[in-house]
Image (cartoon, rainbow, N blue to C red):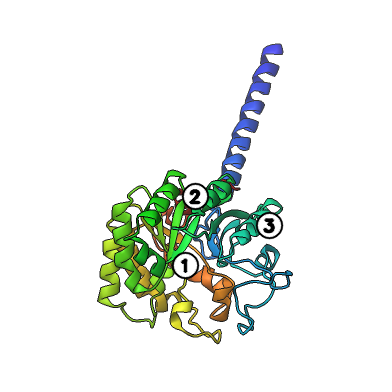
Amino acid sequence: MHARLSRRRFLNAAALGMATAILTRGVTARAATRRTGTGRRDPDIIIDTHTHFYDPTRPQGVPWPAKEETLLYRTVLPKDYKAQPTPQPVTGTVVVEASAWVEDNQWILDLAASDPFIVGLVGNLPVGTDGFRAHLKRFAANKLFRGLRLGVGRVREGLAQKQFMADLRSLAKHDLALDVLGGPDALPDVARLAKTIPDLRIVIDHVANLRIDGRAPPADWFSGMQTAAGHKNVFCKVSGLVEGTGRADGTAPQEVEFYRPVLDAVWAAFGEDRLIYGSNWPVSERFATLATVQRIASDYFSAKRSGVRDKVFWKNAKTVYKWIRP
């Protein structure tokens, strides 16, 4: 009797174990794939690597945007971003500081201290000046400070300046990144800088602010992208697409096909490991909704092999900015 009972218990336990394993595998698989109604896999994490937050109602105001920018000149904070409907929830954001006021870097870091949605700050400091080293030491001590952004004009003139280049080498020694903002003519300067300081991670913002018209991009832009991409420390931010249409009345095309020629070009140049997603919100809001911006990138990269969307939507950003949240 005891033997039969033990055998029955064994069989029941085995059956229960198998059922539990099957159920667990099913739940795990569903959690891992997170498929949409179309059957495609959604990225587990989305890090938007290009947002701007500011508050014109502060006593000191803001240097950007100007009061004449009626859509942009308003208080814009993380809660306002999170209130925007998107196809997939956004996990966090890297803020890009548009203000040239040094203390506005601290303003964003203070904001981030109380809101973990901000995973990093690409700051704005006066590279090439006597005070830069002290500023860098101060802000680099904060783990949320992940790099700097410079306009291409400053990069172009700085390439011939000893102090400027020494400061960028110091940025690299702190393991921080550099965003470069400029048009297609910025690409040769990016390539030159990347060659000169190969351990500095450089990000081309907004696909180099190309004018996008639905047709094949200009050959000189693509050639410049290829040359810059020839340096493995250069990355390209998939941002500024709707802005590239020039349709600031909110009527930028919503279909990925309109942007495909440009996306195909940056894919060919940088591949799956050096493209990162950014919205440029709220600037992008003048051209299209945040949902449209996210959907364009998602629709394009979902057609690539498994795992590519995760790379573009967060893994590559981790490589570039080395953010520590979430």
Describe residue 197's horizontal placement relative to residue 177 as left or right: left
- Which residue is under mark 1? 297
Q: Residue, x 59% and y 36% (percent of image)?
A: 21
Gap between marks 3 and 1, in whole Å?
A: 28 Å
Residue 111 in the image: above or below residue 18? below
Looking at the rendered structure, the kind of residue marked 2 is Arg
Q: Are marks 2 and 3 in contact (CB under 8 Å)?
A: no
Q: Position of residue 64 (x, y in %)?
A: 59, 73
User: In front here: 15 or 141?
Assistant: 141
Marked residue nearer the N-terminal end (2 or 3): 3
Give the residue pinned by disc 3. Answer: 111
User: What is the x, y in percent for residue 183?
Assistant: 38, 73
Q: Secondary structure at mark 3?
A: helix
The residues bearing labels 2 and 3 have C-alpha atoms spaced at a distance of: 24 Å
Q: Which residue is mark 2?
A: 133
Looking at the rendered structure, the kind of residue marked 1 is: Ala
Q: Secondary structure beneath disc 2?
A: helix
Q: Secondary structure at mark 1?
A: helix
